[in-house]
Amino acid sequence: MAILELKNVKKTFGTGHKKVEALKETQFTAEKGELIAVIGPSGSGKSTFLTIAGGLQTPSEGDVIINANNITDMSEKKRSKIRLKEIGFILQASNLVPFLTVNNQMKLLDNVKKGNMTKQELEQLYEDLGISDLRHKYPADLSGGERQRVAIAKALYSNPSILLADEPTASLDSDRAYEVMELLQRETKNKNTTTIVVTHDTRLISYCDKVYKMVDGDIKLEAKPVEEEIH
Amino acid sequence: MFLAWNEIKKNKLRFLLITGVLMLVSYLVFFLSGLASGLENLNREAVDKWQGDGIVLTSESDKSMPQSSMTLDQLDDIEADNVAVLGQLNAIATSGDIKANVAIFGIEKDEFIMPDVTEGEAFNGENEVIASDSLKEEGFQIGDELELSSTDEKLTIVGFTEDARFNAAPVLYGEMATFHRVKFGEAAEQNDDQINGVVLRTNDLKSVTDNEDLETIEMEEFIQNLPGYTEQNLTLSFMIYFLFVISSVIVAIFLYVLTVQKISLFGVMKAQGISNGYLSRSVIAQTFILAAVGVAVGFGLTLLTGAFLPAAVPVSFDIPTMLLYGLVLIVVAILGAVFSVLTIVKIDPLKAIGG
Ligand SMILES: Nc1ncnc2c1ncn2[C@@H]1O[C@H](COP(=O)(O)OP(=O)(O)OP(=O)(O)O)[C@@H](O)[C@H]1O
Ligand SMILES: [Mg+2]
């Protein structure tokens, strides 16, 4: 069964001649264990798509179903609960709390929900992202790339069933970017979760099971990336 | 608490400032309350010392003891478990160079308003008096002969008693006959049945007397009607209440500014699904920590100041009242946080993260 489903979803901003169709009528499903890439030019509607899929904004029309919950008509309070339980966000802007150390960013999640990673898993995650030595630092004392990796750790730490990542590798060098994609791939497969990655970097799409291309609010499935191209 | 405490730890100076302001406000509140109860005692302690339930004065006196003039035979019209007759007048007492405004109480030694002697001995005959020990601080001593402003009679201090000021004047307790001599001079003999009022102990104030000329006044009401008492209390209470409002507003403004600064942060946390409830509780917890620390330090500082204050300053710290005011301060501070909570609830996570 699909973990995430968008049915006849449309999003328009403004009215009259200022009207922008950020997302044209969209059908979209994602299954468990899938790593999906969404590519497309700037302003094509990728972030809009991602935030609607994650229940951060409501579509103008259509239904969004997350893990069998139709969230379209839910109150913000209920949607907030679904987000906490099911969704992990890696946002385009930094989503770290400035007055918490790296370790405490994770602890905050322990404070608000159950089912997060175990100590050993977190240790491994720090290791994989190369941030083990940063755990007692505050976000302000980290580089942009380090901050992004901590944000990734934070999103994965909560064991979300759907991970939505908006340009997660934007401020990483390409080696780091590949490592992060490998990590996301491994997490997705091992935990049978779903990951949707918005990216400009077409080299990264080779890690993905499916690639969608967004053009002017129109989302279309691309041909499956060819395995040989990776190596 | 987790978010609240970690934020305070990271931004110490910011939170130290607001705690400091709260500390000063609470210091002021505690001090004013000390002053209020000090001034209150100044007026009423001699009355409290009676431990009476009410007092009978003449109806036309309008609840003012000096204006009330009755005779001993009116005692027959008064029905109570325990009665004590009282004559009262104010005078200036002089001993050597020291002068003091005093209230002279004429009482019967075997009745219940007879004070406990804490130093020296009880009056025992003509013109001997027990004095309020506040006179001791002004330099009066046992054995002093007091000249009085209104008469040639001289009084002798034979003992002291604690907590005996009536309407801010230290009390001199003496025999009824002494009182009559001071008040009426030559005519004392003819007026030896004159008293000002009768202090009562009874459970049933309503049925004390049915004499139209007499009025039974509940003790607290009598105190409220002491000259200046109510006005003074109202003024100080008003200042204290106003300080409550001020501290609430200060906290509201401060937290609101902090909250507005953190809108995008709250938005990010809300996007992750952290609930309004959790974030609001965190702000409330923060306010509680700040207010509790501020009030506690203010409390300590007040007591410390009180210990070093000269006796002439009429402060008396009533701990239960102070604790109550401290609690009120914490509560109004938390009310001040309500604005911030409303702001948090209204934050749109999407706008905040600028996706
Ligand atoms: N709140 C809004 N109000 C009006 N128009 C909006 C709003 N949000 C997005 N848009 C418009 O919708 C379109 C899609 O925006 P979106 O942020 O989804 O693009 P994107 O593909 O994520 O771009 P980028 O790669 O630069 O992040 C843009 O034309 C944008 O101007
Ligand atoms: Mg975008």
Image (spheres, coloured by chain):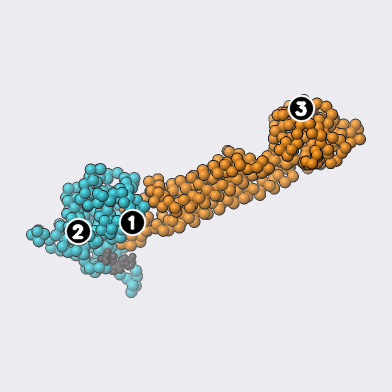
Chain colours: A cyan, B orange
Looking at the rendered structure, whether the residues under marks 2 and 3 are on a common chain is answered as no
Q: Nearer the viewer, residue A99 or A38?
A: A99
Q: Amino acid at mark 3?
A: Ala
Residue tagged 3: B122
Q: CA distance from mark 2 to mark 3?
A: 97 Å
Pointer 2 indicates a residue of which chain? Answer: A
Q: Nearer the viewer, residue B287 or B317?
A: B317
> Mark 3: which secondary structure?
loop
| Residue denoted by label 1 | A140
| Residue pointed to by mark 2 | A177
Residue name at image x 72 percent, y 36 percent: B136
Looking at the rendering, which quadrant does residue A144 occupy?
Answer: bottom left
Residue at image point 43% right, 56% down: B259
Q: Residues within 10 Å of mark 1 (few under 14, many from 20)?
A: some
Q: SS for tag 1?
A: helix
Q: Chain of mark 1?
A: A
- Amino acid type of disc 1? Ala
Q: Earlier in the sequence, mark 2 or mark 1?
A: 1
Q: Is residue A195 left or right of residue B180?
A: left
Q: Residue furthest left?
A: A228
Q: Tell me the crowding category of disc 2: few under 14, some 14 to 19, or many 20 or more residues within 10 angstroms, Cα based.
A: many
Tags 1 and 3 both on a single chain: no
